[in-house]
Amino acid sequence: VLNQWPKRSDREKFRVIKCLRAMLKFLPSSDSPRYLPQIMAAINNAISSSSSVIPDREKACQIHLIAVSTLYDFIKIVTSHDASQVGENLTTIVVALFPLFESKIEDCNLARQHAVKMLEWLASG
């Protein structure tokens, strides 16, 4: 997923995260905690790089939304097995979302709303 991320086109970045999201459906929840660093790295790349470098606002918003959706799906999988793993990595999860709220891209409200929904779900614990 992360191989040559900066060199990928916007369309490829979107596809990569979309494929990652699809692959999560096949991940046993008992195995999920050990993939947390890799999934978080992919999400960080998708959210942070698209915030600053993608000139096409619509593409950036699509990448943001699929990245947040992927993160949300993954957190649900990890939580179903061991909620303490999410608690231990909560700072990393929240920090990964910062670029969404600092972004100058005003059209990305759907991604922000989804991130807020995820954070509210986490807070309700």
Image: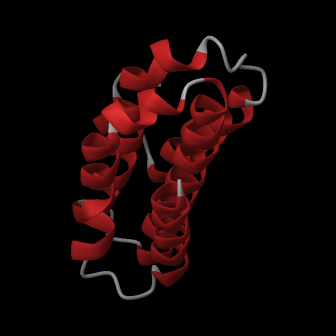
Residue 52, image quadrant: bottom left
Give above or below for 71 relative to 122.
Answer: above
Q: Position of residue 63 (x, y in %)?
A: 50, 57
Q: Position of residue 2 (x, y in %)?
A: 39, 25
Q: Is residue 46 visible to us here?
A: yes
Give above or below for 76 relative to 109.
Answer: above
Residue lying at 46% horizontally and 52% vertically, measured from the top left: 10
Residue lying at 52% horizontally and 77% vertically, measured from the top left: 113
Q: Is residue 49 visible to us here?
A: no
Outermost right residue? 26
Q: Nearer the viewer, residue 22 or 35?
A: 35
> How many marks can you see?
0
Q: Position of residue 85 (x, y in %)?
A: 43, 27
Q: Nearer the viewer, residue 37 or 6?
A: 37
Residue lying at 53% horizontally and 42% vertically, measured from the top left: 12
Q: Nearer the viewer, residue 84 or 39?
A: 84
